[in-house]
Amino acid sequence: MRNAFIPPALRAMRAAYGLPLSNVQTSRPALAMSCGGPPKGVSIRTTAPAPGEEDTSMSAVHRKITAALNPSHLEVIPTYGDPNGSHVTIKVVSDQFQGVSPVKRHQMVYQAIWEELSGPIHAVDKLVTNTPDEVSH
């Protein structure tokens, strides 16, 4: 079943990844699958929690961004205070953002956490991406 209304956030994410809107469906599982997974050439890393670390959505997001971007500073904050919350705020400072446009920076973060965005994470309410130089000024 096709859905006439496509949420703006989904529309923007699909546009950023060059994915068509024609196959967006209404059910939540179908909607997640309609995103088509990560862009071609992007691998999804599945990492296990560190010994003694609880495996939550927040810890998975933190691990995957750390593995992909080697940030000098990273904050993954559940927007409503729930460690398995469906809405998060992410702040990343990484040298890998040097010379990269803001849209591409966001794509880099979304690529790292694609698996969570297709499941337990419903939305990234705020995403701040900076280089170390931008933070120091």
Image: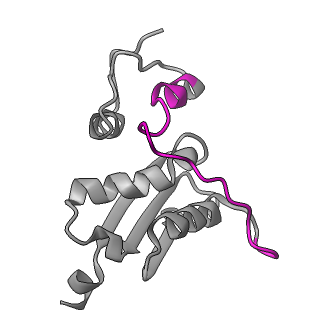
- Secondary structure mostly taken by the magenta-highlighted segment of the chain: loop
Up/down of 70 relative to 108, above or below: below
The residue that appears at 50% across and 26% down in the rendered structure is 31
Residue closest to the far right = 52
- Total numbered badges shown on the rendered structure: 0
The residue lying furthest to the top in this view is 1
**Residue 42 or residue 47, whichever sits in front:** 42
Q: Quadrant of residue 99?
A: bottom left
- Magenta includes 61? no
Q: Is residue 43 magenta?
A: yes
x, y (%) of residue 123? 45, 49
- Is 136 situated above or below 81? below
Residue 47 position in % (x across, y down): 68, 59
What residue appears at the point 27 percent right and 54 percent down from the top-left corner?
Answer: 104
Q: In this view, does 31 lie to the left or right of 135?
A: right
Q: From which residue to which does the magenta span run?
A: 30-53
Q: Position of residue 97 (x, y in %)?
A: 29, 69
Q: Identify which residue is drawn at 43% across, 64% down.
A: 89
Residue 47 shown left or right of residue 35 in the figure = right
Please state the horizontal and vertical placement of residue 13, each as a whole percent of the image. Answer: 34, 40
Q: Residue furthest bottom?
A: 136
Q: In which quarter of the image is residue 100?
A: bottom left
The C terminus is located in which quarter?
bottom left
- Nearest the viewer among 37 and 89 is 37
137 sits to left or right of 4? left
* Colour style of the rendered protein structure: one colour
